[in-house]
Image (tube, rainbow, N blue to C red):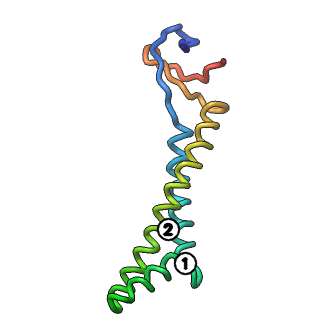
Amino acid sequence: MHTCPNCQSPRITSRHVGRNTGAAVGTAMGTASGIAVALRGATSGAQAGATVGLMAGPLGSSIGAIAGACIGGAIGGALGREVGSDVGEAIDQNWLDSHACLTCGHTFTPRV
């Protein structure tokens, strides 16, 4: 159990600044790249969705293409969030003041 190096209080909390920032950036980047990949080329998710949707006519083809791009974005966003969260956690543990004392407000990185 960690204690505050300033006042020795055991009332501390994790801040997770790096993890939350990394997760947000990873989600945005993963979503953008997932959509870009889904819209690219003849074997893309959008193309596959459009082909499947073509059975329902022109409107179905358009909806299928949009659905394919959305699925690509969702998968990319989920993967980006996981990777960004892991990188942010490593930054929290090694470089940022990752804990805060609830008694005195001091922020610090616990040394193991």
- Residue 15 in percent (x, y) is at 50, 30
Q: Relative to residue 57, is residue 46 drawn left or right?
A: right
The quarter of the rendered structure image containing the C terminus is top right
Q: Which residue is drawn at 62% across and 43% down?
A: 87
- The answer to whether residue 76 is above or below residue 111 is below
- The answer to whether residue 91 is above or below residue 8 is below
- Residue 33 in percent (x, y) is at 56, 66
Q: Residue at x 66, y 32 (%)?
A: 95
User: Decide: marks 1, 2 in contact (CB < 8 A)?
Assistant: yes
Label 1: how many Cα within 10 Å (few below 14, some 14–19, many 20+): some
- Residue 51 in percent (x, y) is at 45, 86
Residue on which disc 2 sits: 72
Residue type, label 1: Ser
- The answer to whether residue 73 is above or below residue 67 is above
Residue on which disc 1 sits: 44
Label 2 residue SS: helix
Q: Which residue is drawn at 39% across and 80% down?
A: 64
Residue type, label 2: Gly
The numbered mark at residue 55 is none
